[in-house]
Image (cartoon, coloured by chain):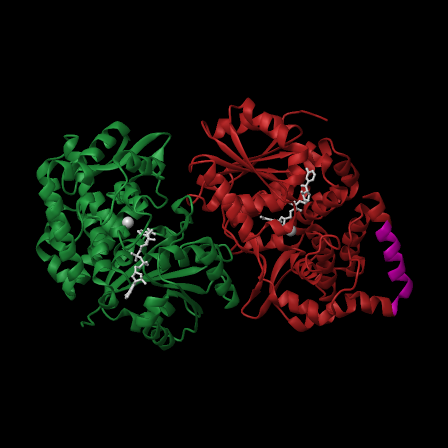
Chain colours: A green, B red
Amino acid sequence: MSHAEPVKVEVGLGERAYDILIGSGLLARSGEEIARRLPGTRAAIVTDENVAAAHLDTLKAGLEKGGIQSAVITLPAGEKTKSFAHLEEVVDGVLAAKLERRDVVIALGGGVIGDLAGFASGIVRRGMNFVQIPTSLLAQVDSSVGGKTGINSPRGKNLVGVFHQPRLVLADTQVLDTLPIREFRAGYAELAKYGLIDRPAFFAWLEQNWGQVFAGGPARVEAIAEACRAKADVVARDEFETGDRALLNLGHTFGHALEAATQYDGSRLVHGEGVAIGMALAHRFSARLNLASPDDAERVEAHLRAVGLPWRMADIPGELPDADALLGFITQDKKVSRGALTFILTRGIGQSFIAKDVPPSEVLAFLKTSHPATLKASHPERSKRSRSERSKRSRSG
Amino acid sequence: MSHAEPVKVEVGLGERAYDILIGSGLLARSGEEIARRLPGTRAAIVTDENVAAAHLDTLKAGLEKGGIQSAVITLPAGEKTKSFAHLEEVVDGVLAAKLERRDVVIALGGGVIGDLAGFASGIVRRGMNFVQIPTSLLAQVDSSVGGKTGINSPRGKNLVGVFHQPRLVLADTQVLDTLPIREFRAGYAELAKYGLIDRPAFFAWLEQNWGQVFAGGPARVEAIAEACRAKADVVARDEFETGDRALLNLGHTFGHALEAATQYDGSRLVHGEGVAIGMALAHRFSARLNLASPDDAERVEAHLRAVGLPWRMADIPGELPDADALLGFITQDKKVSRGALTFILTRGIGQSFIAKDVPPSEVLAFLKTSHPATLKASHPERSKRSRSERSKRSRSG
Ligand SMILES: NC(=O)c1ccc[n+]([C@@H]2O[C@H](COP(=O)([O-])OP(=O)(O)OC[C@H]3O[C@@H](n4cnc5c(N)ncnc54)[C@H](O)[C@@H]3O)[C@@H](O)[C@H]2O)c1
Ligand SMILES: NC(=O)c1ccc[n+]([C@@H]2O[C@H](COP(=O)([O-])OP(=O)(O)OC[C@H]3O[C@@H](n4cnc5c(N)ncnc54)[C@H](O)[C@@H]3O)[C@@H](O)[C@H]2O)c1
Ligand SMILES: [Zn+2]
Ligand SMILES: [Zn+2]
């Protein structure tokens, strides 16, 4: 447990610029860091039951040390919480606490809480101050940075929300120690994503040092800081996702389709696992289209396998819908533009790009060859091996 | 029914700049005007039952002439529609129509529909294109301009929403002919407000020409255009209401308290009527504080009386809560900052200013002297006259 000075990453958004602090033990300093930036503020903490049990008292004490009083709104954990009903509940809780525009909503939790509380803070009184205290690895390297907030609709994930930048992000790397290992691994997929998008040296560093990132200590802080720098760069270039920011969706078109295909059943697939498989598929698909070398796809698959992440559709427990149905999920996805398919493809590790007009027929053909049903038919024992790998993974989790 | 070229008012918001077109017969040109600015767009029209009955077919035909297909979402009329439940309904309707970010949500209705549809368009896919087609006078001169959108909470009006600028506002002055006269008058209060804020010549012009504004024709177009110019100026100076924009709240602190005190019962008081009384009270209160001459308050009261608007609390049918309770509604209002009261006061016609730290004790004393109970006790026949004026007003409506 190190309490060295935190690493600071600045998100350069002009008037809306803010700091991300990454370090061990930041919850205890939260009051000081927030009060410095928002003097005289009062707070409403939004959190979920799991995170509240582990970290709420530490946060409340940290806020009090900075003289910040806080109301608490605790919600059930899980993706279902990103709903209109819970949005209304948070909005009402913030209003009940009589907070004004200059007061602050604090999200203490993973991406679910961050997205929901961020959305609520963006619409109460047409926009209040907001601070992210991400407690999952995914939230620390991805969802807490960049100002995308939102909830799900019965018609699709994240279809409703606002861009609302936080005033500060406090990523306390120590809180990750209570995170279930499976969630940690899922977040690691998004961390590795930045290497695959445009930081090949970072990916190579992770191939060498991933064990220490899992173990904690300075390597974890450094990896999270690098991920935040990568995301902050993209966000500063394209705050409202009209261009470049789409690169962050590497792995997500396939990943979302798999999440939908498994009915968002987290016991089968959590988001980061979908992204892991999606990234591997994006590299394989790029190789199939002769854009990248199959060696790069191999390297990605090997690294995901090494850390214990699923990397192919066959790693998902239970039956999957067939390739046509999977394509259906992709074309329903929000990144479909006027019927043409937009994908993030790659020319190799760290060389991702936005490909518009990918022919659906190519995607379908690829999905067919990658589908577990096809693999099982052609390589019966390979599919068996995948199953035993899977149970190893869940034993280690 | 004149079909001269519409008047154009530009809202100067840089990247988010847009035109307001004001003229008779604009619904028929809607497709052309929208398609010119948003080529290839599809649309979802949000409207209410009253407005749909009178104007939906004309709008749909106008859109089709410009090659724009549209889905329609029709809601019940009235302030209660600005709720989370109806927000969710509109969001779902827009998603059901499979609209993308570059497609457009069109609000066809009064301020209720504009606020609700604007909010929905601001959160579906984190912000879609939005066009306002205001059909009430209040919406044409006020709510459709400036990008404030939102819904009500059980804890207060307009407490939840976003800033989301439209891409175009089409104010068809001809559609106002189906508006109930009482609603027209209520909107006229907001129109006159701009004169009282900082355009004394406009107020003087209205004193002379209000009859022609009610009658229709070029004076109506010119008055609405001047109101839009006034609002656009304020909005361009302070898009996110961190300063000057608060001037637009002239009459609204008292007005909101009266709306709350009458439980938002539109049969007793509609918003614009509350604003009319509120503006008269703001001028009277300023005179009482020796900021302005009582002659100016008299002029405001006389003009409101001339057009048939209520101008004092005694004009509200039914019993009102006492002065202490009214002050309670004011201090609960959102313009309360850290316990001090912010009011828009005036130094005379067209010389309004933002007064912070108005002592609640002064407000209370003023409310006591202006309260119908006090007036009745001291001038019994004056209160009788007000009742007969009221019934005249409702007969002409
Ligand atoms: N806004 C964005 O830019 C963005 C980006 C990526 C993902 N997301 C969203 O993020 C969500 C996924 O985030 P997530 O994976 O953090 O999910 P999550 O918030 O559901 O957290 C995962 C689980 O871990 C628990 N948890 C979190 N921190 C913990 C801790 N320190 N100790 C113990 N338990 C802890 C939670 O209670 C939950 O059960 C999705 O809804 C996704 O859409 C948003
Ligand atoms: N966003 C802003 O900046 C802003 C500013 C001022 C007011 N507002 C909001 O505006 C709302 C009040 O607006 P409103 O007065 O237009 O109310 P409204 O939308 O309820 O319209 C008033 C009534 O007139 C009917 N109507 C509207 N146009 C008609 C037409 N052409 N023919 C026949 N009937 C018609 C409606 O159906 C309704 O019954 C309030 O909710 C207020 O909070 C917003
Ligand atoms: Zn993701
Ligand atoms: Zn108003």
- When the figure is inspected, residue B276 is found, relative to residue B72, above or below; the finding is below
Q: In which quarter of the image is residue B15?
A: top left
Q: Residue at (26%, 41%) from the top-left corner?
A: A254
Q: Residue at (53%, 24%) from the top-left corner?
A: B66
- When the figure is inspected, residue B91 is found, relative to residue B365, above or below; the finding is above
Work out which quarter of the rendered image holds the N terminus of chain A and state it: bottom left
Q: Is residue A359 visible?
A: no
Principal SS element in the magenta part? helix
Q: Is residue B95 left or right of residue A346?
A: right
- When the figure is inspected, residue A63 is found, relative to residue B277, above or below; the finding is below
Q: Residue at (21%, 33%) from the top-left corner?
A: A368
- When the figure is inspected, residue B143 is found, relative to residue B348, above or below; the finding is above
Q: What stretch is highlighted in magenta?
A: B378-391
Camera-side residue of A263 and A338: A263
Work out which quarter of the rendered image holds the C terminus of chain A and state it: bottom left
Camera-side residue of A146 and A396: A396
Q: Where is residue A231 in the image (x, y as percent from the top left)?
A: 26, 50
Q: In which quarter of the image is residue A280?
A: top left
Camera-side residue of B10 and B81: B81
Q: Position of residue A225 (x, y in %)?
A: 21, 58
Q: Can residue B70 be seen in this view?
A: yes
Residue B25 belongs to magenta span: no
Q: Is residue A220 left or right of residue A332?
A: left
Residue B388 belongs to magenta span: yes
Q: Where is residue A11 in the image (x, y as percent from the top left)?
A: 30, 54
